[in-house]
Amino acid sequence: MVPLPVPPSVTAILLDIEGTTTPITFVKDILFPYIQDNVEEYLHKHWHEVECQEDVRQLRLQAEKDSGLEGFVPIPSSTDDEAELQVIRGVVDNVLWQMSLNRKTTALKQLQGHMWRSAYATGKVKGEVYDDVVPALKKWKEANLKLYIFSSGSVEAQKLLFGYSIEGDLLELFHGHFDTTVGSKVESESYKRIAEKIGCSTENILFLTDITREAEAARTAGVHVALAVRPGNAALTDEEKSEYQLIPSFAQLQLPMT
Ligand SMILES: CSCCC(=O)C(=O)COP(=O)(O)O
Ligand SMILES: [Mg+2]
């Protein structure tokens, strides 16, 4: 295992989830099918609740932006009671359409986070993390590094995954969580905003992710980056392999003075 020295300027480690702390298969084979199988029932059950109506309002706002996209599925806008079933059907179809494209819209991610609550709370689902993750996070925290998550999954979804993980409640390891409300993961500005919110410079942050476009955006902002190479992640080109530091395991990161 080739050690990767953490630059001495780094005081915070920012972590992606899917493909970095957690297998892509957990998201694709467990979390997403849970939404696809339960979204219709969930909407019927919670339709008149404030939170659910706010989720639907956000999905409608997103749908207005998406109307020009190929295959776009609209959400009917009737308030008539009789049409309620049709509106719910429209929301279901819109959610399934967005998921078929693996969209990362904030509206979709908020609804998903709310839906996963009961899956985790009832023990139907437990958040998966790779074996090397918890020992490394503990070591980094002991070395006074601050640990943050940046995922397209909503902050609530992130907290559920780590709060109800196969390794127990891991939330105390993290100083904070960021989602797409701070901006897209493929835009440099998002990383500058995160640094501002943490109260540090971008060069004080090391971002670990499996996606080259995210790494590139972070690097452009002045953030240090390394690419997580995990089983089942998308294959990297030779150019990507030569351009980025690669880490198959968090154990590879070597802290200064260790
Ligand atoms: C943390 S919730 C489940 C993951 C999810 O919905 C997602 O879109 C993963 O995105 P990431 O930015 O962690 O790759
Ligand atoms: Mg990822």
Image (tube, rainbow, N blue to C red):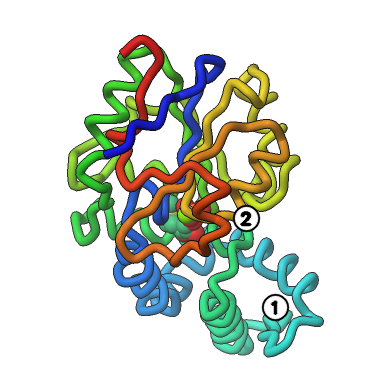
Q: Secondary structure at mark 2?
A: helix
Residue 165: % across, % down: 24, 45
Q: Quadrant of the N terminus?
A: top left
Q: Which mark is residue 213?
A: 2
Q: Nearer the viewer, mark 1 or mark 2?
A: 2
Q: Residue at x 52, y 80 (%)?
A: 100
In this picture, is 102 found above or below 246?
below
Q: Residue at x 63, y 32 (%)?
A: 223
Left or right for 190, reference 240: right
Q: Quadrant of the C terminus?
A: top left
Q: Residue at x 59, y 47 (%)?
A: 215
Q: Residue at x 28, y 30 (%)?
A: 136
In this picture, is 70 found above or below 238?
below
In this picture, is 93 found above or below 234?
below
Left or right for 141, reference 200: left
Residue 95: % across, % down: 55, 76
Q: Are marks 1 and 2 in contact (CB under 8 Å)?
A: no
Q: Residue furthest top?
A: 257
Q: Between 245 and 168, which is closer to the camera in this rendering?
A: 245
Picture quarter containing residue 204? top right
Looking at the rendered structure, the kind of residue marked 2 is: Arg
Picture quarter containing residue 50? bottom right
In the rendered structure, which disc, 1 or 2, sits on the residue that comes first in sequence? 1
Residue 113: in sight, yes or no?
A: no
Q: Which residue is mark 1?
A: 79
Residue 144: % across, % down: 40, 12
Residue 238: % across, % down: 51, 61
Q: Secondary structure at mark 1?
A: loop
In this picture, is 251 found above or below 80?
above
Looking at the rendered structure, the kind of residue marked 1 is: Thr
Query: Marks 1 and 2, how far apart in space?
Result: 41 Å
Q: Between 155 and 43, which is closer to the camera in this rendering?
A: 155
